Image (cartoon, rainbow, N blue to C red):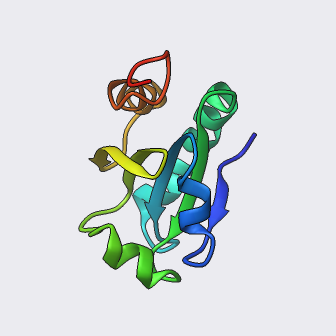
């Protein structure tokens, strides 16, 4: 499974139920581009527990402003629409999964 692309129009609907990891990124960000295969690998491993999505902040200004994106890539874990955790900057697959766990997104934490 790959990370699903979100837009300003469908953002709230997609983060309002369950556990969701959102990658805020741009196509002009080298670190964001390098994170794509890592994000897809994480999505493949945890898709049964966490919906993994991404949103291009250049094309979706509402999301960028609403969630105060100050650095990219920025990862945010939502649980039923409420932010559980944020992380900024590139990371390894293991670090990203660890962040999701610490934010209560998987392994029953935060349920």
Q: Residue at x 60, y 78 (%)?
A: 9
Q: Nearer the viewer, residue 4 or 27?
A: 4
**Up/down of 12 relative to 36, above or below:** below
Name which quarter of the figure residue 40 lies in.
top right
**Up/down of 67 relative to 52, above or below:** below
Position in image of residue 11 (x %, y %): 56, 67
Q: Residue at x 47, y 74 (%)?
A: 28
Q: Would you say 85 lies left or right of 81 here?
A: left
Quadrant into which the C terminus falls: top left
- Furthest toward the top, the residue is 107
Looking at the rendered structure, the number of numbered marks drawn on it comes to: 0
Quadrant into which the N terminus falls: top right
**Up/down of 49 relative to 6, above or below:** above
Position in image of residue 87 (x %, y %): 29, 45
Q: Residue at x 58, y 47 (%)?
A: 17
Position in image of residue 42 (x %, y %): 58, 33
Position in image of residue 39 (x %, y %): 56, 43
Q: Residue at x 42, y 81 (%)?
A: 62
- Furthest toward the right, the residue is 1
Q: Would you say 10 lies left or right of 100 here?
A: right
Q: Nearer the viewer, residue 44 or 82?
A: 82
């Amino acid at each position: 499974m790959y990370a699903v692309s979100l837009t300003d129009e469908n953002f709230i609907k997609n983060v309002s139920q369950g556990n969701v990891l959102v990658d805020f990124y741009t196509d002009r960000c080298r670190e964001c581009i390098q994170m794509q295969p890592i994000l897809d690998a994480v999505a493949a491993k945890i898709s049964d527990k966490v919906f993994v999505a991404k949103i291009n902040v250049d094309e979706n200004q509402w999301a960028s402003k609403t969630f105060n994106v100050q650095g990219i890539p920025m990862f945010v874990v939502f649980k039923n629409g409420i932010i559980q955790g944020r992380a900024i900057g590139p990371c390894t697959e293991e670090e990203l999964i660890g962040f999701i766990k610490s934010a209560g997104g998987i392994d029953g934490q935060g349920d």
